[in-house]
């Protein structure tokens, strides 16, 4: 009997040793192909898997090293070790376990052992599993070796094929050109009305809400024969970037200030734009025909911003005008021409064209269209242009009135048709020799942008990896004194609540997030709206994300995106066809179209407000003072009772109550009883005495206040202020 027990015990010990050997990584890799299903026999399971262990009298301590020896032997036969040079290992950014073992001159088991007590899951590793640079360096260091990075294959440097501006022109070929004048000023101070009066058209009447929505470039012919190119930029806060872009390509700034309003927020901003661009100013004090007009006050206010008029010893010309009645407009035009003559504005009308995109849009009939100002050369039909990452072969050119033109010389604004894609406002326009050359330029610019993006992405990834590594090491240090089982239990307890809260968190996130799609008529309008959205600072209330923006009417792609992200579509000066509206209604997608930017932002704020959880407001119904305290016995319990007198409003038993002591709320809840002369009553009015008890055993004190109130949900409004 004892002999049998000893034999069984011995078999169990051998089986345990065999199982341990079975789970070693090296044995798994080498013997996996040798494992085959075997029919049951009288032999123990371990004897089938490991016939070498059936020899009696062999101890486990002898058997295991033999098996270990076999595994390492086969590994050595399969892969020969690479001799090391002075203990240095040549590493790459990514290597397989097998490659690293070969480079180090070690077996695969050594790599597995080095990875113990790291964040790598050993069970999922194979010889061809990829290790990244941080783990590779860690393994080499643990092995007492040094590493050096392998030389990367030098990528053939790509030739720069970008288009660049020509060298400065010979002064002999320069000819006078019209000045480019930007009209800046505060909202509704009369900029568009001034420009309208100068060119005798009705631009202001056509603009939605009477406010210029996007930049316009116009050529004005004066009776004297002089030409002036005007840029009309929006004045309200939404379009700060567009005004800044206007001053970058302008020669003279006319600052319009209303005589009755004086210096305002956008007036100061416009002055700053002009100073940054180094552009001279002419002051146009508008609305001087009004009784409350005070031009002298305007001039004095501008002194605080370093704008000194000629009558105060400065160099800024000031002209009092009335844009609406057309008073003194020729004086303003003559002042502009005089300043332009002093500046001696000249340009080269020969050679390849150079210019700047003022505005761009996508027109249904014309396709991508840009408004541009030519700065050098003469633009003609058939010219090949590049701007940003797109190009054009000029098909047609139009002036500000929509009439076709054959040529555009320096200083002339023109609308260009023939672009492959819509360029961005502010992009530099350069003419190239051929379409093939245009493709080369666009390809190079796309390539350089991709390289920059890859570089930024790598930096972000490395920073994140470093951050995660530091977090992991901190966690490991805290758990270093625990066994792996204890460590696993601690991590499970720490993360257990997250498993159950994730769905709820996702629901809350969806509820308090507004995802929007922005579509605009022109590039500048979309840019302005995005600039406003950049000022959003109430993410703690409701998160706001722009998932897509673009130019053109609402289309099916926008609907699909909005459906996928549960978003809302906002359109500015664009349309949505009936079929698109029906599709959106069918899918439950909101489309909000506006022609005035203020209305769009107000609608956006309303949409944000609808996603905010309501705030609970307490309305006081009645107040009573505790004049006496006593207790009553109900069964075996003593219940505190307060004798009160109502001195304001009424006490309604159905409502909520709170107990206030020395200014602090010490209880909130419901009444268990409300009596008047020993009778249960539903409510007590002002001036009446009553006895009441709470739904808890809190002792009353003389001087306590009892407040009866009701809670009402009130819609919250976002704290975001876009600056209007």
Image: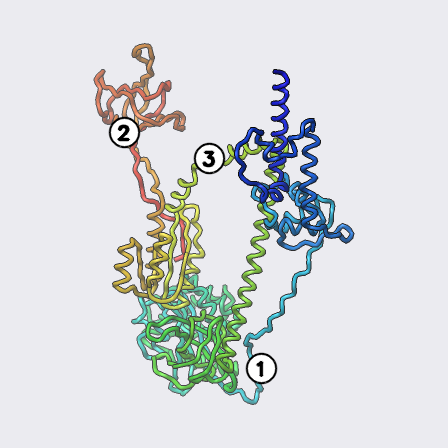
Residue at far top of view: 636
> Where is mark 1, residue-wise?
168
Determine which quarter of the picture holds residue 712. Answer: top left
Is label 3 or label 1 in front?
A: 3
Q: Which badge, 2 or 3, comes first in the chain's sequence?
A: 3
Is label 2 or label 3 in front?
A: 3
Give the x, y percent position of residue 554: 33, 63
Give the quadrant of the N terminus: top right
Residue 585 or 487: which is nearer the viewer? Answer: 487
Label 2 crowd bin: few (<14), some (14–19), many (20+), radius 10 Å: some
Give the residue drawn at x 58%, y 29%.
Answer: 44
Can residue 471 be seen in the rendering of this structure?
no
> Where is mark 2, residue-wise?
655
Specify the label residue 497 is tagged with: 3
Give the x, y percent position of residue 503: 40, 41
Q: Which badge, 1 or 2, comes first in the chain's sequence?
A: 1
Left or right position of 657 against 45 = left
Give the x, y percent position of residue 95: 63, 52
For the residues labelled 2 and 3, the Cα–Cα distance comes to 36 Å
**Secondary structure beneath label 1:** loop
């Amino acid at each position: 009997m004892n002999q049998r027990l000893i034999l069984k015990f011995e078999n169990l010990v051998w089986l345990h040793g065999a199982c341990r050997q079975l789970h070693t990584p090296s044995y798994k890799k080498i013997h996996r192909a040798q494992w085959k299903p075997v029919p049951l026999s009288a032999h123990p399971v371990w004897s089938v898997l490991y016939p070498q262990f059936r020899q009696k009298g062999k101890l486990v301590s002898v058997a295991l090293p033999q098996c270990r020896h076999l595994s390492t032997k086969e590994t050595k036969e399969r892969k020969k070790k690479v001799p090391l040079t002075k203990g240095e290992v040549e590493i790459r950014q990514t290597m397989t376990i097998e490659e690293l073992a070969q480079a180090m001159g070690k077996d695969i088991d050594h790599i597995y052992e080095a990875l113990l007590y790291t964040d790598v899951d050993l069970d999922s590793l194979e010889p061809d599993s990829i290790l990244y640079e941080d783990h590779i360096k860690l393994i080499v260091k643990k092995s007492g070796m040094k590493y050096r990075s392998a030389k990367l294959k030098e990528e053939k440097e790509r030739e720069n094929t970008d288009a660049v501006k020509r060298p400065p022109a010979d002064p002999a070929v320069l000819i006078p050109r019209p000045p480019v004048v930007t009209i800046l000023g505060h909202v509704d101070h009369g900029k568009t009305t001034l420009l309208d009066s100068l060119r005798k058209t009705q631009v202001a009447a056509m603009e939605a809400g009477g406010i210029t929505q996007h930049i316009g470039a116009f050529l004005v012919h004066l009776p004297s024969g002089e030409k002036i190119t005007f840029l009309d930029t929006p004045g309200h806060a939404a379009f700060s970037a567009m005004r800044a872009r206007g001053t970058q390509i302008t020669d003279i700034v006319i600052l319009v200030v209303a005589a009755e309003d004086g210096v305002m927020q956008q007036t100061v901003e416009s002055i700053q734009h002009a100073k940054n661009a180094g552009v001279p100013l002419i002051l146009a004090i508008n609305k001087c025909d009004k009784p409350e007009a005070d031009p002298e006050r305007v001039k004095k206010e501008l002194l605080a911003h370093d704008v000194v008029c000629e009558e105060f010893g400065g160099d800024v010309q000031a002209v009092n005008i009335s844009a609406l009645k057309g008073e003194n407009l020729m004086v303003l035009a003559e002042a502009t021409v005089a300043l332009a003559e002093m500046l001696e504005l000249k340009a080269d009308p020969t050679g390849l064209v150079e210019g700047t995109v003022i505005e761009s849009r996508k027109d249904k009939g014309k396709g991508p269209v840009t408004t541009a100002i030519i700065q050098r050369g003469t633009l003609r039909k058939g010219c090949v242009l590049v701007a940003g990452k797109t190009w054009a072969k000029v098909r047609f050119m139009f002036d500000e009135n929509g009439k076709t033109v054959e040529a555009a010389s320096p200083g002339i604004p023109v609308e260009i048709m023939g672009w492959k894609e819509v360029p961005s406002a502010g992009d530099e326009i350069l003419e190239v020799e051929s379409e093939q050359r245009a493709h080369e330029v666009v390809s190079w610019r796309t390539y350089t942008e991709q390289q920059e993006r890859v570089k930024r992405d790598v930096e972000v990834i490395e920073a994140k990896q470093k951050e995660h590594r530091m977090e992991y090491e901190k966690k490991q240090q805290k758990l270093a004194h625990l066994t792996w089982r204890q460590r696993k239990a601690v991590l499970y307890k720490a993360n257990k609540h997250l498993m159950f809260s994730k769905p709820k968190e996702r629901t809350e996130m969806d509820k308090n997030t507004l995802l929007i799609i922005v579509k605009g008529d022109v590039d500048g309008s979309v840019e302005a709206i995005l600039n406003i959205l950049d000022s959003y600072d109430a993410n703690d209330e409701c998160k706001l994300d722009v998932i897509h923006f673009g130019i053109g009417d609402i289309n099916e792609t926008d609907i699909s995106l909005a459906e996928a992200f549960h978003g809302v579509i906002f359109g500015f000066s664009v349309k949505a066809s009936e079929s698109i509206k029906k599709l959106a209604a069918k899918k439950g997608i909101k489309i909000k179209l506006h022609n005035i930017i203020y209305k769009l932002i107000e609608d956006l704020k309303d949409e944000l407000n609808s996603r905010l959880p309501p705030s609970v407001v307490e309305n006081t119904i009645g107040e009573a003072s505790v004049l006496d305290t006593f207790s009553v016995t109900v069964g075996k319990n003593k219940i505190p009772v307060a004798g009160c007198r109502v001195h304001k409003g009424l006490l309604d038993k159905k409502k909520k109550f709170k107990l206030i002591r020395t200014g602090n709320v010490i209880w909130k809840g419901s009444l268990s009883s409300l009596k008047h002369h020993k009778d249960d009553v539903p409510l007590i009015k002002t001036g009446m005495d009553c006895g009441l008890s709470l739904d808890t055993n809190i002792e009353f004190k003389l001087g306590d206040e009892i407040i009866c109130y009701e809670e009402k949900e009130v819609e919250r409004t976002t704290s975001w202020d876009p600056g209007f």
